[in-house]
Amino acid sequence: MAQNHLLLLPGDGIGTEIMAEVEKLIAHLKEKGLADFSYDTGLVGGSAYDAHGQAISEEDMDKALKADAVIFGAVGGPKWDDVPYEVRPEAGLLRLRKDLGLFANLRPAICYSALADASSLKKELVEGLDILIVRELTGGVYFGEPKEIIDLGDGQKRGIDTQVYDTYEIDRIARVAFDLARTRDKRVHSSEKRNVMKSGVLWHEVVTEVHKDYADVQLDHILADNCAMQLVRNPKQFDVIVTDNLFGDILSDAAAMLTGSLGMLPSASLGAPDANTGKRKALYEPVHGSAPDIAGQGLANPIAMLASFAMALRYSFEMIELADKLEGAISSVLEEGLRTGDIMQEGCKKVSTAEMGDAIIAKI
Amino acid sequence: MAQNHLLLLPGDGIGTEIMAEVEKLIAHLKEKGLADFSYDTGLVGGSAYDAHGQAISEEDMDKALKADAVIFGAVGGPKWDDVPYEVRPEAGLLRLRKDLGLFANLRPAICYSALADASSLKKELVEGLDILIVRELTGGVYFGEPKEIIDLGDGQKRGIDTQVYDTYEIDRIARVAFDLARTRDKRVHSSEKRNVMKSGVLWHEVVTEVHKDYADVQLDHILADNCAMQLVRNPKQFDVIVTDNLFGDILSDAAAMLTGSLGMLPSASLGAPDANTGKRKALYEPVHGSAPDIAGQGLANPIAMLASFAMALRYSFEMIELADKLEGAISSVLEEGLRTGDIMQEGCKKVSTAEMGDAIIAKI
Ligand SMILES: CC(C)[C@H](C(=O)O)[C@@H](O)C(=O)O
Ligand SMILES: CC(C)[C@H](C(=O)O)[C@@H](O)C(=O)O
């Protein structure tokens, strides 16, 4: 059994608690002889800022670059609302994405059937929902230059951000989406605002071109505003949605909330395959945030974090069977009626973060 | 009774049919001695392109600049998917917004109680919903320069758009939002992505500053991705949302769809008050699009168009009573069970565009 090396970055708020469940799982897998992971831990976000004035230290960046996968909790909280822009908690996450070249962000929006009632949408619209949002993660308005505030004098300032996409960036994310669609329902919606944005015109053009290599996959183009509408109206019409960094941020959050399963949703951020080894850099994180209001009380739902670890097993370590087993364990504890507070329903049993983690791990 | 001058721009698709109902209403108001409007009509969007190769002619732009208000239908359709970017149908609308200086876009997302069942959200979450989205409309990534596609050689292109906001642009839209909140529930959510965008940092700073003049209004800041989530989770938590051009485009469409009343929702786009006359330039348009698939068949729902005319009565002509009467007429035909196809429900009576228009007008 190969020794696979991880970097665990719990981050802020509930990050620590949910990451503790990952550590338990790793120990369990080793004990059972199912998988052997070694790992380091590091600081990111507000906790890194408190420790050394940066949203992630050079040392931890170095560890991230060397790890086979980074397992990430969550960052941010009111405590750091007023720290300088360059060292705000999010800067740690953005640097990891950029320096690791994690251009492909996979965000499944699935509705756990045990939780279909929890959605704000009518049950029949979300039951069985299974969308995969493929978000470009290292380009667009997140990283384009100039990005600055200029003082114009006379009390006037100018805030500038730049949305930039090159052909190759759109090409590679489109291929990720089409490849994944082939393993699913073979349908891709590409979303942009080409009626207003030149980057959207190029996006549309390049995706259309790449599609020629994927004639077996159906491609539809949908404007981002209409996509937001259609997600609300009838989310099941979608299979894979590929979109840019900013639209992906908003659309994937809306889609996650639609499922009623927000505390359950994982994500994977992947780089390009290494030219020699074929290995991709990767970071796995829950879609939810750091929830500072409930941190430290054992109330957090560890499912999204554990499901993110399942994505790591699947995409970074080709442990498909083990990933299936972990995802199955999550479904079955939900079927059995175990619930953390955020998803509590009548007739179910309320459990703590650790109890939920234990119950899932016990099934593996 | 003053003579008030309008420019009617029906545009494309169902635009013509729904504008015909406005013309009937204007004739009715005159006949009854309730209001006296004169008007011109013009072309915009694909129909303008077909007529003279531009998305709006200089002559019609001139008429728009001189009118007391522009009443706008909808633009676009597959017929013009491949026309050059500069003369695509949307360019006509964008030029009107920019050249008329219509920086404040008011988009009410209300749920007509007769239609609460039509929402994809659970009825209790949308019944009585009444949000006002105040979208900045002449700045941001829609108009910032550079906005271009550069050929980099070697098969690579670069698409660039620029998000730009100056202090004064944020200041004036914030004031519109706070002023309107005072006439409502006195709560404003300001939405941006200050954790990623410098324009968002400035937005947050300026809105916070302007708020000092509105101590009686509650201000909350919410990141745009979280705002999309919260709209889906529990839309009734919002009163007024103020946001930039691009986020406003997406969030207002999502909010409109949530109500289940998309074919019913109007919008107003307003300029700054003239230094001498105090009059604002203004354009009124339905939130829905040109629906080319059902155009020309008498199937379109004219309610959003007539409700937009009610906004014109309210905001451009201070005919508050008449606006109330028109809005009341719309509610009561819905209560009586009249429905166009898009909102048809069991037990209701299906009517055509003209029949719906007639029924509403008959009540005034
Ligand atoms: C924390 C923040 C910078 C981040 C983003 O905007 O990408 C988050 O919202 C996400 O979606 O992962
Ligand atoms: C037609 C299009 C240019 C427009 C926009 O993006 O503003 C539309 O979506 C809207 O919201 O009015």
Image: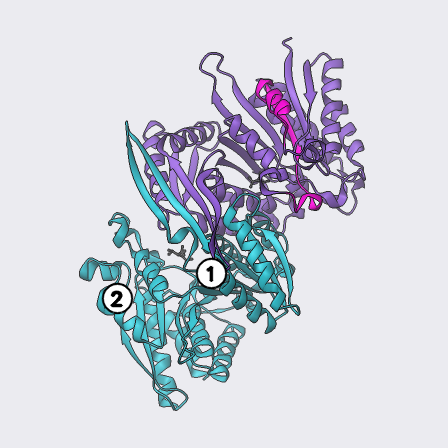
Chain colours: A purple, B cyan
Q: Which image quadrant for residue B51?
A: bottom left
Q: Give whichever of B350, B166 is nearer the camera.
A: B166
Q: Is residue A313 visible?
A: no
The C terminus of chain A - image quarter:
top right
Residue type at mark 1 is Glu
Task: Tell me if residue A88 comes above or below residue A360 in the rendering.
Answer: below
- In percent of width and height, residue A304 lies at 66, 34
Task: Please tell me whether mark 1 sits on a helix, a strand or a loop.
Answer: helix
Q: Which residues are magenta?
A: A56-83
Mark 2 nearby-residue class (10 Å; few <14, some 14–19, many ≥20): many
Residue type at mark 2 is Leu
Say if the magenta span includes residue A143: no
Say if the magenta span includes residue A57: yes
Mark 2 against mark 1, which lies toward the viewer? 1
Task: Please tell me whether mark 2 sits on a helix, a strand or a loop.
Answer: loop
Task: Report the chain holding disc 2.
Answer: B
Task: Report the chain holding disc 1.
Answer: B
> Residue at the spot x=51%, y=52% of the render?
A233
Q: Which residue is mark 2?
A: B43
- In percent of width and height, residue A220 lies at 38, 41
Q: Which residue is mark 1?
A: B169
Q: Is residue B185 visible?
A: yes
Badge 2 or badge 1: first in the primary sequence: 2
> Residue at the spot x=51%, y=59% of the render?
A155
Q: Quadrant of ligand 1?
A: top right
Q: Is residue B192 left or right of residue B90?
A: right
